[in-house]
Amino acid sequence: MFAIWRRELQSYFYTPVGYVFMGVFLALSSVMFYLQIMAQRSSDLLTFIGQMSYLWMLLSPVLTMRLLAEERQKRTDQLLLTSPVSLLGVVLGKYLAAVTVMAAATLLTGMFVLIVAIYGQAYPGELMVGYLGFLLQGCAFAAMDLLISGLSRNQVTAAVMAFGANFALWMLDMLESSVSIAWIARLMSFFSLYSRNEPFLMGQLSFASIVYDLSFAAGCLALTVHVLDSRRYNGGAA
Amino acid sequence: MIELKQVTKRYGAVEAVHDLSFSAPRGQIVGLLGQNGAGKTTTLNMLTGYFPPTSGQVLVDGMDMLQHPRHCKRLIGYLPEKPPLYDEMTVAAYLTFVCRLKEVARRSIPAHTEEIMHLCGLWEVRGRLVGHLSKGYRQRVGVAQALCGNPPVLVLDEPTVGLDPRQVVEIRELMRELGKSHTVIFSSHLLSEVQQLCQRVVMLHRGRLIREADMAELTGEGDVLRLRASIAMKERQLLPALKGLPCVRRVKALPTPDADISEVLLECSRDGGERGDPRTQLFRLLCALDAPLHMLAVERDNLEDVFLRATSEDDAVHIPVR
């Protein structure tokens, strides 16, 4: 598992994917920082973090699309699956590589915090909660998008479907208020990754949300393992 | 070392491999021979644990692949039909990754990969990206990858396909070299290749085992002695007499232009029993019949004949598996 994590991580930066992700992430978050903080002369970092979380929706597929679809397309999965590694090890290694890059990008947004801390006022506790929610949300998106990569044979398909799924989750949140049947609305808000993130953005350490995000990610990963395993039983390449 | 027991693999409605059993003894080179679509790749994918059989069992070193996958997979190095290479890595980085994957002790990885690169002739290209290598070199990286972790069993799927003649010779040399210290199982549709390299042959046709035998036995050095004789006597008289010989198992008359001269193929037991060598018995019989022998030759079957016979015509011909 560690070997796979390490290879994927290296691979992000042997190829343009890692740089593209980092570049676009930082560029967009800078724009958001300007609009939300600088232009408004505000030090409301939590709102800024809340806005940044839309970046996961956009960029998480970039990190995950390759991970499983490419192995399948190029038949390199034959190496992984005939090596003494479990399927769970393969999936976790790849997932953690994506999450590591996300965490690195998040770490780099620390410079915005630094700017606010120097010229304004930053509240560490509140910020830590905000960032925790931000990262957890990223983990949830990455897990779902990895599952989609595992389902597809082609990177582009994987990316497009992952965008779609991420977007659908976001829509779920917007549509919720216009659904008049109460239980459906409740169900929708239960699954929405965005409404789950709200407590963090108010500086509340919500255990329900932590548990939800983590179990959402774990569920997606378990499904991914299941998808790969059942494909093996149905005959490899088919 | 490796044993398949009544292995069947179905892809949906298609049965790719049916009730296949064979074994690869320790330290031998075993060739899996069959035409395209005979089930070779499917078989190799099952015995390396890439996917499990629909039914049946794969045993590696006596352990069941499904129950002890980690243990079994550690013992096998696999070169699939298409080498599983990551184009964005350098040769050295790729082999280091494979070593880590195969749980080679961290400290011995540099020396181990260096040794493998020298063995496979990759040392000069170690710093190049795998994606930039030519087909022959990619194949070598594939072989090198299978050697990482020094597994006692090597499984190679059509290792020489698509290479130019010189590369083919090189890869075969390498396989012969490796065969001295490893159990090697490889698939091929080239009969000559199998004949050159293997001690044991497993023939597949349409997913079924049609023959499993030692090479010596298949090519006429086993307990069957094939004789071709040209005898000046009418078939009608000759054939019953030949069938009467205790050492003769099968007689086949070949067409001849001259009705007074018969040409026959005899399958005899090499060990003719108390009456001595089959050739001696034949000589005595012909003397007694006063049938002059024009020609007698020992037929050394090449694999091609065996294979074609086994898969010929309507595929209904089954050579009984001993």
Image (spheres, rainbow, N blue to C red):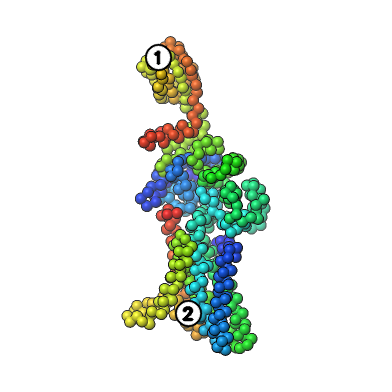
Residue drawn 58% across and 59% down?
B88
Tell me the CA gap for discs 1 and 2: 100 Å
Task: Give the vertical position of B57 relative to A221 (above or below).
Answer: above
Q: Quadrant of the C terminus of chain B?
A: top left
Rendering coords of residue B30 (x, y %): 52, 40
Question: Does label 2 lie on the same chain as label 1?
Answer: no
Between residue B284 and residue B41, name the one nearer to us.
B41
Q: Is residue B318 left or right of residue A6?
A: left
Instruction: Tell me if mark 1 has few (under 14), some (14-19) or many (20+) residues whose alpha carbon lies within 10 angstroms of its own.
Output: few
Q: Which residue carries the number 2 mark?
A: A197
Secondary element at image label 2: helix
Q: Which residue carries the number 1 mark?
A: B260
Rendering coords of residue A160 (x, y %): 45, 67
Q: Disc 1, disc 2: CB below 8 Å? A: no
Between residue B253 and residue A91, name the one nearer to us.
B253
Which amino acid, mark 1? Asp
Q: Is residue B28 left or right of residue B111?
A: left
